[in-house]
Amino acid sequence: MVATMPPILQVRDVTFGYDSQPLFYTVSVQVQPGEMVGLLGPNGSGKTTLLRLISGFLQPQQGHVLLEGRDLKQWGRKKVAQHIALVPQELHVPFAFTVEHMVSLGRTPFVTSFFGSHTRQDQIIMQDAIEAAGVAPLAERVFNELSGGERQRVTIAMALAQQPRVLLLDEPTSHLDIKYQIETLELVQKLNRERGVTVIAAIHDLNLAARYFPRLLLFQRGVVADAGPAEVLETGLLRRVYGINVQVGILRGAAHLSVLPPASDVPLEPAERADISRVHVMAGGGSGEVLMRALADARIPFVAGALNIGDSDHTLALRLADEVITEQPYAPISSAALAQVRSSLSYAPLLIFCPTPIGPGNLVLLQEAAQAAHRGLPVLLLAASPEQMADEDACEREYRREFAARDYTDGEGGKALEVLLQSDAVVVQSIGEVLEMIKKRQSLLTEAQISPE
Ligand SMILES: Nc1ncnc2c1ncn2[C@@H]1O[C@H](COP(=O)(O)OP(=O)(O)OP(=O)(O)O)[C@@H](O)[C@H]1O
């Protein structure tokens, strides 16, 4: 039997936000000792925040971060710092400290004497860190007078002086020229391979990520994908997460994937392929999770949206849907997103409306669904809890009842629901029923396409 190693780090159901604004819900990630993980995601997706939570600099509002199976809170700050080092994007130092002094600060968690003096062993470790990060020629210089790239290398030296078992790097190459970008990542890789240091690095450069990180975590206020580069650096997924077309392939002679801008004849953000076989899903707040998984399992292509970034349905849709119509976090559905929804509905053979709460922010989606139904688009209203109903009328009565409990729009939602029901929207009790109806609809469409007129 192969003994599996316990994870060195576990982010378990972590929820966090700044002030009263939630940033992400119930994020879970496990990292094994000796792994090298690249953390990808657009600006503002929460990478720095996640690294700060893992380092113990921030505390989860809910959930736990565990180091070797023990909650960071139980370890205490000093002990955590003996194991985990975080290299921040920028380090602001209010004093004219020299590089040597800065690196010595990296040993602080290990200083035991009252006067804070370093032992001979500390001196050797500091010197080793200075050499490894390539900052020996800068040792006497004042940190604040260095260039951005030089400062970045000094902060790496500080982290190395900490001799961490886990090294967290927040965009370690952002200020570096190409030579130092490669040298820095080679150094990190060497520490990982030769000293078994576990590495998690937020990184924007997808090519460097593909080259140096065997595991990539694509993050957008939640884990969108967690796998090797071949699975994560997938054009459709990158388009949905970053909102841009790229080409992904292996350049001649290279051993890893490359991500390049699109060829010049491809528009940067083209309209999605209009495809009459893609059903449209309106969801939110987790109400679409089971349905989207079932559609993906049944290989039924679908468009999802509009969904807010950070909504768990949005995170899942980025992985499973053909297209995701995205709205900013916590923002009401904008007219631009609504226009995309309208365009999708004009091609879709069917719309499925999941049992999401209706508030002022997403009321327009329900109203758009009602208009589409009125124009003749088949709409399925997925019930919140599957129940055996005597007939269609009983289904509608029950649906109205549970809808009223999640309608926060002073009756506007109820009006849109009545339009839907009058326009032959069908209440469905189970995902199985939805799949059957889609298949029926698809075979009707196929028959219509092949029948000679
Ligand atoms: N101290 C803070 N107070 C309030 N909001 C914050 C704070 N720090 C970050 N945020 C917000 O949290 C969100 C996530 O920020 P974070 O820095 O974690 O993202 P990121 O993925 O690292 O972004 P980038 O790639 O631009 O560095 C952003 O909307 C940001 O404005």
Image (cartoon, helix red, strand yellow):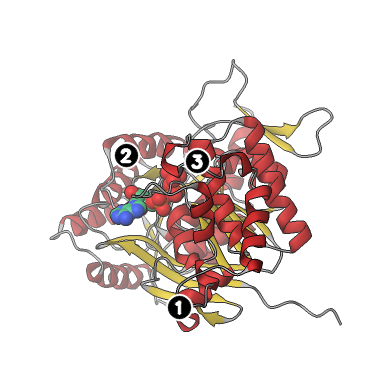
Dot 3 amino acid type = Arg
User: Are the two marked residues, 2 and 3, in contact with CB atoms closer than 8 angstroms?
Assistant: no
In depth, the one of 433 and 328 nearer the eye is 328
Q: Secondary structure at mark 3?
A: loop
Q: Residue at 31%, 73% (x, y): give it.
A: 398
Which of disc 3 and disc 2 is earlier in sequence? Answer: 3
Instruction: Please give the residue where the numbered disc 2 appears in the rendered image.
Output: 338
Question: Is label 2 within 8 A of ligand 1 (CB to nearest ligand atom)?
Answer: no
Which of disc 1 and disc 2 is earlier in sequence? Answer: 1
The part of the image, by quadrant, that contains residue 9 is bottom right
Which of disc 3 and disc 1 is earlier in sequence? Answer: 1
Please tell me whether mark 2 or mark 1 is closer to you in this view.
Answer: 1
Say if residue 385 shows up in the picture: no
Instruction: Please give the residue where the numbered disc 1 appears in the rendered image.
Output: 114
Q: Residue at 40%, 60% (x, y): give it.
A: 354
Q: Secondary structure at mark 1?
A: loop
Of the numbered discs in the image, which one, if any, rests on residue 20? none
